[in-house]
């Protein structure tokens, strides 16, 4: 009897072992290393082994927080990510509702179009949009008669364009998820609401929206996380962060600090700042999940 | 009725705008170079040509990069399916003390900005390559390992719902019939969870196939081991971009993902629902 119980107890461990064997060395340990690196002066001399890594404590963070560029990039990241999230959710939610109100052909067309945008790799989207908005050969300048206009010259215009690509990539996820959620609302509930005299708007606000709430929370948090970590679109479309780094976001900034200027310690400190911000978002996510009754 | 017509028209217009960049990509890939360079670009072409595909695949060695991407993505999908299945079973079929902790850790792992991990991973992969050949810098193995790790938390989290949906009575009946643990796992549970594996597979495939940052960070000098996203940058030149080649290469890069998406479209949506609702 005791043998069976012990085997029972060990079985989940065996089943989890392969996952842990990959995740601990490739995920957990690097995360710990990231924290460690952020406390050291680690540059080219240390990489080549010429000098030992020097412990600087909070030095990297102090240097970072004293640097006005960091605050500019942080502000930009927050504004850019927030803008992307808001537009993605607005477009996605509006189209999800639209999907429920249209004929079969239009629905198929919109679903297919969304699918292509969703499936397109970030790299593909970035290069195609760059081509469309190219200053010399781009279709957009041709149609608008803006010959030679450079869309990446102005900081806000460049950010808006990259944001458009991000939204184009991510609204399908929101649209399809929310549409699936709306479909799952039982018709009988809506009929009952209509019998009680509720109009379409009231029915949506009082019946559909509350049922969709958990789904909406997840979609919001997921969008925040994705848009906060945008790398490829910015890096490719603005050529590594825009003219004189005007279009940097934290992710690209950390990469440039580490790999372009060999300040690995400083880059890691930026990575830690990002991790902390996203973990705070995660905490809200967990709380939201718990409130909706998700059992872990 | 009129409102319905308006809604239909709006939806079709949005669809047209959404699909247009993809249409323009494929069209430009098929246009002869002269037309791409021409001052008034037309939304159609009368002389479709495969010259850009030819130059992308032949001259620029895109066949090789395509193969590299496929090897990385498919290996990640296979390994991730196998490993996440076992983990999902452990987390749904057994109660043990650290279960909730592990679940929360997988959830938190999904939120970690893995891009930031490129810095410590760069050194780790470099050092690992010195002792274990095949997984160091400039190898496809390094990309496989990293992408596998990044795809696992989400895959496990998502698959949990599918495993939980399989009635436990089936396993109990099989046990009564004398089936061993191994048989139950592989002959009964695994096929039943296959639809969920398809859904998680798409996500792992896309993560691995689309990765640009890690490919750029790890594959420094061995250009023959480059994957598609990073290799695409080869076409960008300081003076003039070869847009025809870039569009042909982008088209080649998009097709597999699109095919994947279309194949598992329904599964994908129910998979999202499964991850959401458990």
Image (cartoon, grey):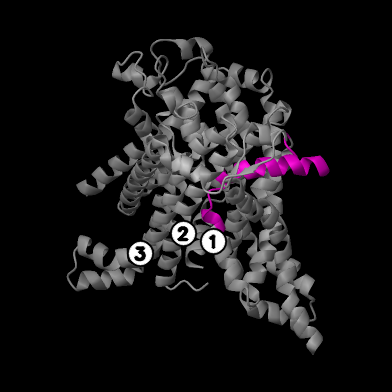
Residue B43 in which image quadrant: top left
Q: Which residues are magenta?
A: B109-138
| Residue drawn at 75 percent across, 42 percent down | B127
Q: Nearer the viewer, residue A117 or B187?
A: A117
Disc 3 from disc 1: Cα separation = 20 Å
Residue of label 1? B107
Q: Nearer the viewer, residue B99 or B240?
A: B99
Q: Residue B124 vs residue B102: left or right?
A: right
Q: Residues within 10 Å of mark 2 (few under 14, many from 20)?
A: many
Query: Secondary structure beneath disc 2?
Result: helix
Query: Residue B132: in sight, yes or no?
Result: no
Crowding around mark 1 (Cα neighbors within 10 Å: few <14, some 14 to 19, many 20+) is: some
Residue at the image position 80 percent from the left and 76 percent from the top:
B180
- Secondary structure character of the magenta stretch overall: helix
Q: Quadrant of the N terminus of chain A?
A: bottom right
If you read the primary sequence from the N terminus, does the residue marked by circle 2 or circle 3 appear first?
3
Can the viewer see residue A169?
A: yes
Instruction: Say if the magenta span includes residue B127.
Output: yes
Please name which of the two marks, 2 or 3, marks the residue nearer to the observer. 2
Mark 2, residue position: A282
Q: Which residue is mark 3?
A: A213
Chain at numbered mark 3:
A
Q: Residues within 10 Å of mark 3 (few under 14, many from 20)?
A: some
- Disc 1 from disc 2: Cα separation: 8 Å
Q: Residue at x 19, y 73 (%)?
A: A196
Q: Residue B217, relative to residue B197: is it above or below? A: above
């Amino acid at each position: 009897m005791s043998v069976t119980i012990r085997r029972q107890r060990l079985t989940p461990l065996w089943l989890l072992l392969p996952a842990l064997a990959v995740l601990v060395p490739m995920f957990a340990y690097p995360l710990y290393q990231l924290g460690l690196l952020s406390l050291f002066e680690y540059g080219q001399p240390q990489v080549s082994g010429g000098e030992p890594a020097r412990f600087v404590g909070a030095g990297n963070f102090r240097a970072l927080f004293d640097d006005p560029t960091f605050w500019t990039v942080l502000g930009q990241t927050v504004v850019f990510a927030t803008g992307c999230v808001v537009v993605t959710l607005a477009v996605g939610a509006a189209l999800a509702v639209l999907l429920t109100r249209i004929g079969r052909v239009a629905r198929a067309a919109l679903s297919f179009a969304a699918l292509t945008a969703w499936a397109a790799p970030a790299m593909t989207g970035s290069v195609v949009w760059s081509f469309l908005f190219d200053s010399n050969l781009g279709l957009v300048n041709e149609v608008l008669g803006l010959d030679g206009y450079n869309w990446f010259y102005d900081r806000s215009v460049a950010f808006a364009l990259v944001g458009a690509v991000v939204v184009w990539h991510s609204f399908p996820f929101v649209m399809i998820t929310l549409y699936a959620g709306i479909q799952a609302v039982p018709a009988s509930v809506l009929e009952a609401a209509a019998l009680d005299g509720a109009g379409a708007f009231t029915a949506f606000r009082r019946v559909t929206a509350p049922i969709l709430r958990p789904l909406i929370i997840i979609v919001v948090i997921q969008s925040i996380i994705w848009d906060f970590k945008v790398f490829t679109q910015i890096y490719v479309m603005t050529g590594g962060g825009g003219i004189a780094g005007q279009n940097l976001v934290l992710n690209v900034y950390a990469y440039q600090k580490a790999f372009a200027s060999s300040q690995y310690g400083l880059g890691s400190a930026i990575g830690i700042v990002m991790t902390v911000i996203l973990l705070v978002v995660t905490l809200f996510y967990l709380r939201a999940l718990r409130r909706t009754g998700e059992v872990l | 009725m009129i409102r319905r017509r308006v809604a239909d028209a709006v939806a079709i217009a949005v669809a047209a705008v959404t699909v247009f960049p993809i249409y323009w990509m494929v069209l430009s890939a098929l246009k002869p170079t002269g037309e791409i360079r021409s001052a008034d670009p037309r939304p159609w072409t009368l002389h479709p040509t495969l010259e850009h595909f030819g130059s992308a695949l032949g001259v620029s060695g895109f066949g090789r990069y395509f193969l590299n991407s496929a090897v990385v993505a498919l290996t990640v999908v296979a390994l991730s399916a196998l490993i996440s299945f076992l983990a999902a079973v452990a987390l749904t079929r057994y109660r043990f003390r650290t279960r909730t902790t592990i679940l929360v850790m997988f959830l938190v792992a999904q939120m970690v900005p893995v891009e930031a991990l490129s810095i410590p991973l760069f050194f780790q992969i470099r050092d690992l390559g010195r002792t274990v050949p095949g997984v160091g810098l400039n190898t496809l193995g390094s990309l496989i390992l990293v992408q596998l790790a990044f795809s696992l938390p989400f895959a496990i989290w998502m698959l949990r719902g599918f495993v939980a949906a399989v009635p436990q009575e089936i396993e109990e009946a099989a046990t009564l019939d004398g089936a061993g643990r191994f048989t139950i796992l592989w002959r009964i549970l695994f096929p039943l969870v296959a639809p969920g594996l398809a859904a998680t597979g798409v996500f792992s495939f896309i993560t691995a196939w689309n990765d640009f940052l890690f490919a750029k960070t790890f594959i420094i000098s061995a250009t023959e081991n480059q994957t598609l996203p990073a290799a695409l940058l080869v076409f960008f030149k300081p003076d003039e971009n070869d847009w025809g080649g870039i569009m042909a290469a982008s088209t080649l890069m998009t097709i597999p993902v699109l095919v994947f998406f279309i194949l598992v479209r329904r599964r994908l949506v129910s998979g999202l629902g499964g991850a959401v609702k458990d």
